[in-house]
């Protein structure tokens, strides 16, 4: 059995050990940050830009920035044409699909890394890992067709970059790029990942968070549409009827 003074001594040593600051981890080969970490969507929102900037220790390194989020399930429908109509033929659902995806790089991607490294780091929309749900019975080629259609639809909506944005260097070590977010960018939590590559291999990485949120009347309408869809639909119909009646009344007065 321990005596009281031994217990007291043990407690004192434990507190002393906890009081010693943890040894900091080795610094990465760069530092980077965003001009702001919150994008507010209002009724007048038509898109915005966010500046990403940083500094490299090794000027011979390349930099790649990946922006993705929020992750949601997505359904891709394949349609076929019958006479003058398009009819649904099949659909496939994917999980953890980024609603928005963008890439910026200091050089063309094929000059920075091999296809294997680009695929391993999911750099580029074609390298995104999109897991199908309920794909039993579908051939690999069919799944790839649905996947390509998903990416194509996102690009058409402006939510996936159709080109790699340029990262510019100032003085060899300082770098910057502008991230463009369209007016239809979905609200949610985004991940901004900055990679340092040298000799085609990722040397260090840093991840920052970015929040896109609706505020004011836009937020109330969005919440109503998602939480009380029947009420939102009825309100929309009544508003349309009221607007039509007002316009008709004004026309008759003329």
Image (cartoon, rainbow, N blue to C red):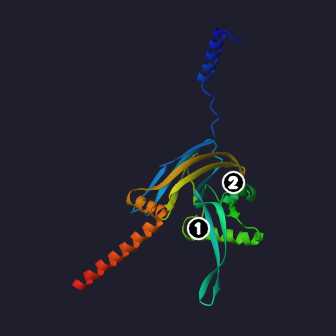
Image point (77%, 70%), residue name: 137
Q: In which quarter of the image is the C terminus?
A: bottom left
- 204 or 4, which is in the foreground? 4
Residue 235 marker: none
- Given the current orientation, which residue lies at the most extreme bottom position? 83
State which tag comes first along the sequence, 1 or 2: 2
Q: In this view, does 207 lie above or below 158?
A: above
* Residue 93: quadrant of the picture: bottom right
Query: Residue 49: where, in percent of width, then height?
Result: 48, 57
Please give the count of numbered marks on the rendered protein. 2
Q: Quadrant of the N terminus?
A: top right
Query: Residue 6: where, in percent of width, then height?
Result: 66, 11
- Given the current orientation, which residue lies at the most extreme left position? 253
Measure the alpha-carbon separation of dots 1 and 2: 20 Å
Q: Few, some or many C-alpha atoms within 10 Å of disc 2 (few <14, some 14-19, many ≥20)?
A: some
Image point (61%, 15%), residue name: 12
* Residue 82: quadrant of the picture: bottom right
Query: Residue 22: where, in percent of width, then height?
Result: 62, 28
Q: Is residue 157 above or below residue 117?
A: below
Q: In this view, does 108 lie to the left or right of 53?
A: right
Q: Name the residue under label 2.
A: 121
Q: In this view, does 143 lie to the left or right of 43?
A: right
- 224 or 41, which is in the foreground? 224
Q: Is residue 3 above or below residue 232?
A: above
Image point (59%, 71%), residue name: 153
Q: Mark 1 points at which residue?
A: 154
Query: Residue 184: where, in percent of width, then height?
Result: 49, 65
């Amino acid at each position: 059995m321990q005596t009281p003074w031994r217990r007291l001594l043990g407690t004192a040593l434990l507190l002393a050990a906890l009081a010693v600051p943890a040894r900091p981890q080795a610094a990465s080969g760069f530092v980077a940050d965003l001009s702001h970490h919150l994008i507010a969507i209002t009724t007048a929102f038509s898109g915005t830009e966010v500046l990403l900037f940083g500094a490299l220790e090794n000027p011979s390194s390349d930099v790649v920035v990946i922006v993705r989020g929020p992750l949601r399930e997505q359904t891709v429908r394949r349609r076929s044409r019958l006479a003058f109509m398009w009819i649904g033929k099949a659909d496939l659902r994917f999980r953890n699909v980024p609603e928005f995806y963008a890439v910026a790089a200091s050089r063309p991607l094929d000059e920075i890394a091999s296809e294997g490294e680009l695929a391993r780091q999911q750099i580029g929309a074609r390298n995104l890992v999109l897991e199908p749900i309920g794909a039993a019975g579908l051939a690999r080629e069919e799944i790839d067709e649905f996947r390509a259609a998903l990416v194509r639809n996102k690009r058409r909506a402006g939510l996936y970059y159709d080109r790699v944005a340029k990262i510019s260097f100032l003085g060899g070590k300082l770098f910057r790029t502008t991230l463009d977010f369209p007016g239809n960018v979905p609200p949610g939590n985004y991940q901004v990942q900055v990679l340092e590559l040298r000799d085609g291999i990722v040397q260090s990485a840093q991840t920052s968070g970015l929040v896109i949120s609706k505020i004011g009347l836009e937020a109330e309408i969005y919440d109503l549409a998602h939480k009380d869809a029947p009420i939102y639909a009825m309100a929309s119909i009544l508003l349309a009827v009221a607007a039509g009646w007002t316009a008709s009344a004004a026309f008759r007065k003329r």
